[in-house]
Amino acid sequence: MSLIKTLALSAAFAVALMGGAASAQEPTRIALVVKSLGNGFFDAANKGAEEAAKELGNTEIIYTGPTTTTAEGQIEVLNSLVSQRVDAIAVSANDPDALAPVLKRAMDRGIKVISWDSGVAPEGRIMHLNPSSNALIGETCLKLAAAALPEGKGDVAILSATATSTNQNVWIEEMKKALPNYPGINIVTTVYGDDLSDKSYREATALLQAHPEVKVIIAPTSVGIVAAAQAVADAGKTGQVFVTGLGLPSEMAGAIKAGTSKSFAIWNPIDLGYSAAMLAHDLVEGDITKVEPGQKLKAGRMGEITVGEGAEAAMSEPFTYDASNIDEFSKIF
């Protein structure tokens, strides 16, 4: 073989090796799909996902979602991600059933899919990560409402996100199940603000006008709870009506100090985004297409997360924030 041919073959072999090495170094791409962009809760979750990516190395987080909380908007985003052939999708769903077909198609193409925060129908995901036990969240919301009511008795209303929001509906059902433990509480109505600040504010304002007997508004949504607190203040009902539910310390500090809210709860959204990214990465690395009850998955600094029935897992209990700790935590998230 001539020297020229030998050199040419060597060069071709080197190029092939370099191409293989470059391919091997391609990052694991995890899409963190949220209900809508511009939501402080999900922005905080993205910080956690980015933390996980940095810890894992060679991992890219694609933070995305629609501009409004609609299933149609999420489906458009998901179709694009399937076309991009990302390695994993971790989605907080606006509708459990509407998203299932596109997510099933994603799994058929080898993309690992989990839902987190707000679940997808089982056929549309490998597993779901609840931020906490649904029963504990429902119980916590009622406990906080009872603490705000004189002698734990009075009329309560709920300001939810969308009428199809999986997690919101589950938590409301858990509140109703826990009502026998709080015989003094009467839930008079549930309204929906679609996780939009302006609509949530209008719904809370209309609620106060239509139901002057209501003494507590429970908003199990970080957007709704802030809007409800503002509506109470603007209606001149501070100290007469209290707002509680699930919110971010940084966004609720003013309401606590103003007296429109005595207390509220939330898990750490940074930890939730971190855990979702870690679990998605586990599924990709292990090429896991199905999980079983009792199976343990690694979640970095969060330890091991155990899968339960229905391929669902829970991260941690919700934590209560009030005047005693709001300053400390409002600096964090």
Image: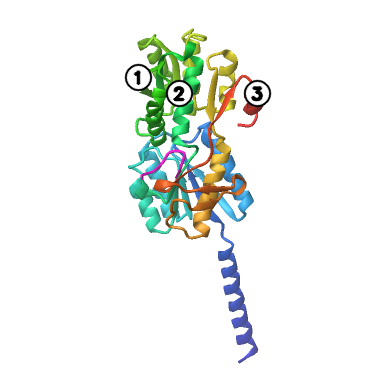
- Label 2 sits on residue: 142
Q: Residue at x 45, y 23 (%)?
A: 142
Question: Which image quadrant for residue 171?
Answer: top left
Q: SS for tag 1?
A: strand
Among numbered discs 1 and 3, the one appearing first in the sequence: 1
- Label 1 sits on residue: 189
Q: SS for tag 3?
A: helix
Q: Residue at x 52, y 52 (%)?
A: 296
Instruction: Determine the CA span between mark 2 and mark 1.
Output: 14 Å
Among numbered discs 3 and 2, the one appearing first in the sequence: 2
Name the amino acid type tagged 1: Thr
**Tags 1 and 3 touching, CB below 8 Å:** no
Residue 136 percent coordinates (x, y): 47, 32
Mark 1: give few (<14), some (14-19) or many (20+) Cα within 10 Å: some
Q: SS for tag 2?
A: helix
Name the amino acid type tagged 2: Leu
Q: Observer-nearest residue: 200 or 265? A: 265
Residue 179 percent coordinates (x, y): 39, 23
Q: Is residue 46 left or right of residue 189?
A: right
Mark 2: give few (<14), some (14-19) or many (20+) Cα within 10 Å: many
Against 257, residue 49 (above or below) is below
Q: Which residues are magenta?
A: 115-121
- Label 3 sits on residue: 327
Residue 165 percent coordinates (x, y): 38, 34
